[in-house]
């Protein structure tokens, strides 16, 4: 994931987080880079598709947030 904030300095720094609907035991997001990783390998028979939200929040005194819906599926 990549989010850009037009503010300069600390206010423009973006932090990433996952929505409540996904377990950190399944997906990990690096809060500084936005890189998404599986915490454990997916079992296609158990979970062939996942949908979750990634949030990007700036570091301003009054933070603003935006979200993106992610749909991921296993290869056949």
Image: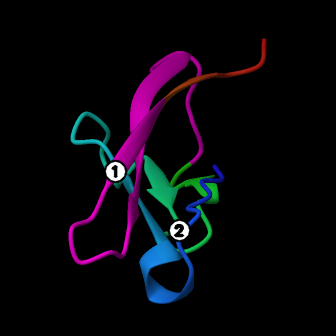
Q: Position of residue 9 (x, y in %)?
A: 54, 88
| Residue depicted at x 55% and y 16% | 48
Packing grade of label 2 (10 A; few <14, some 14-19, many >=20) is some
Identify the magenta region: 41-68
Q: Which of 61 and 30 is in front in this view?
A: 61
Residue that extends furthest to the right in the rendered view of this protein? 76
Label 1, label 2: how many angstroms apart (C-alpha)? 16 Å
Q: Is residue 71 above or below residue 25?
A: above
Can see residue 14?
A: yes
55 lies above or below 47: below
Q: Does the magenta stretch include residue 50?
A: yes
**Residue to which mark 2 is pinned:** 30
- Residue beneath the point at 32% across and 75% down: 60
- In the depicted structure, whether residue 75 falls above or below residue 26: above
State whether residue 13 appears in this view. no
Q: What element carries label 1?
A: strand
Decide: marks 1, 2 in contact (CB < 8 A)? no
Residue 21 relative to residue 44: left or right: left
What residue do we see at 66% from left, 53% from top?
Answer: 2
The residue at which mark 1 appears reads as 65
Residue nearest the observer in this picture, 56 or 37: 56
Q: Which residue is drawn at 41% across and 38% down?
A: 67
* Residue count near mark 1 (Cα–Cα under 10 Å), binned few <14, some 14–19, many ≥20: few
- For this view, does 39 lie left or right of residue 2? left
Q: Quick one: label 1 or label 2, which is nearer the N terminus?
A: 2
């Amino acid at each position: 994931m990549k989010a850009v904030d037009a503010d300069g300095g600390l206010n423009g720094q973006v932090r990433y987080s996952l929505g409540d609907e996904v377990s950190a035991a399944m997906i990990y997001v690096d809060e500084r880079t936005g890189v998404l990783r599986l915490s454990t390998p997916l079992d296609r028979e158990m979970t062939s598709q996942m949908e979750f939200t990634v949030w990007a929040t700036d570091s301003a005194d009054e933070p603003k947030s935006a979200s993106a819906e992610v749909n991921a599926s296993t290869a056949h």
